[in-house]
Image (cartoon, helix red, strand yellow):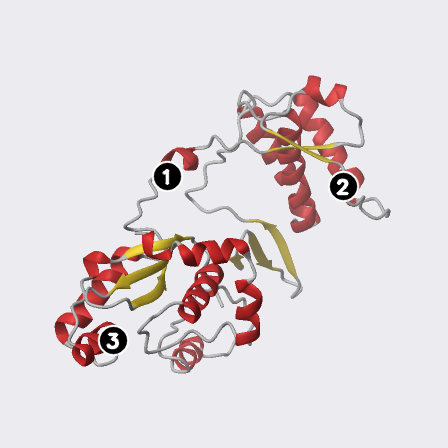
Amino acid sequence: MDDVFAVLPSDSHLNNILSQLNQCVPSIKFTLEKETDVGLPFLDVLVKRGSNGFPSFKIYKKATHNDSYVHWFSPHPKKIKMGIVVGFFTRAHRICSPQYLDDEICRIRDVFKRLAYPKLLVDDALSRCRKRFYSSDAAVSFNFNNVLVVPIATQKMEKILHPDINIITNNCNNIGSFLKNTNHNTVTSGGVYRIPCMDCESAYIGETNDFKRRMYQHEYALRTGDINSSLYNHRVEMNHRIRTSDAGLIMKTDSAEKRLLYEAFIINNVDSFNINKNNLIDRFTNKVLLQSSKLTYFLKNLNNIT
């Protein structure tokens, strides 16, 4: 629950109601905002209380709002710019009461005039908006079967293609793609890992989404003598040596489903000293998986993977 708009009798004790609400769940605290000048903002709508008891509505903008939108000289396709203007006019028609609609339309015109949008395009956008808003016909559904995804759409491209084809721009070269960490280090990646015993052929099999963190947890369990640790129990019962530094990922993946599947398959088919066995795969399913040449080859080469 985020924002709540409530209408209460004028003689209500608001502070008492707020106190009772905050006592329901200690971890959830409500705040109170009362109307100012017979108006109360709710999301992007300013609700005005009329003298006749009926509310009226207009677009609400915070004091820090600066009308910073896509400039006309930006590389965005003209269709997108048109869609932005149409969207603003449509929102005004849907939200504003009649007495506020003309002022909001004038404000939208001024905003896009400052952004260098041609007057003819803004007029066309308003005409399209009114035609759709006041039309009794059902909206035309978007045909997802005739979609062409391109990095940049141009007017020349739209003229060449069939008019029934819907062009969608999807440029992967954005700021996020440059800032994204593409260094997939084996030490910090997720997957299925193996910790071998130094004195026997058994090994511990596990899965994790953070290899480095998981190795620290195993090392801590060995140091503190955690009786719930498979590594610690094997070392004590067999008097064998185990080093987490000998561990390695035998299969890397970010998919939790794949990690659990491979972990269960490996535990079922190798000599492991895991206390808690992964029961995701039953015997019948295990036999079916063993018929896969890829998985059989994976098991044969398991001891050579580090």
Q: Residue 167 placed where, x, y %?
A: 69, 31
User: Which residue is drawn at the image coordinates 22% and 78% (left, top)?
Assistant: 233
User: Which residue is drawn at the image coordinates 43% and 44% (left, top)?
Assistant: 63
Where does label 2 land, which residue?
Answer: 145
Q: Quadrant of residue 76?
A: top right
Who comes first in sequence, dot 2 or dot 1? 2
Please indicate whether residue 185 sits to the left or right of residue 93 in the image: left
CA separation, marks 2 and 3? 54 Å
Please indicate whether residue 288 sits to the left or right of residue 142 in the image: left
Where does label 3 land, which residue?
Answer: 229
So how many labels did they put on this image?
3
Who comes first in sequence, dot 1 or dot 3? 1
Pick whichever, 174 or 206, lies toward us. 206
Mark 2, secondary structure of its residue:
loop
Q: Residues within 10 Å of mark 3 (few under 14, many from 20)?
A: some
Where does label 1 land, which residue?
Answer: 182
Q: Nearer the viewer, mark 2 or mark 1?
A: 1
CA separation, marks 2 and 1? 33 Å
Q: Residues within 10 Å of mark 1 (few under 14, many from 20)?
A: few
Q: Residue 54 placed where, x, y %?
A: 66, 63
Amino acid type, label 2: Asn
**Is residue 180 visible in the rendered structure shown here?**
yes
| Picture disc at residue 233 | none
Mark 3, secondary structure of its residue:
loop
Please indicate whether residue 12 sits to the left or right of residue 15 in the image: right
Are discs 2 and 3 less than 8 Å apart at CB?
Answer: no
Amino acid type, label 1: Thr
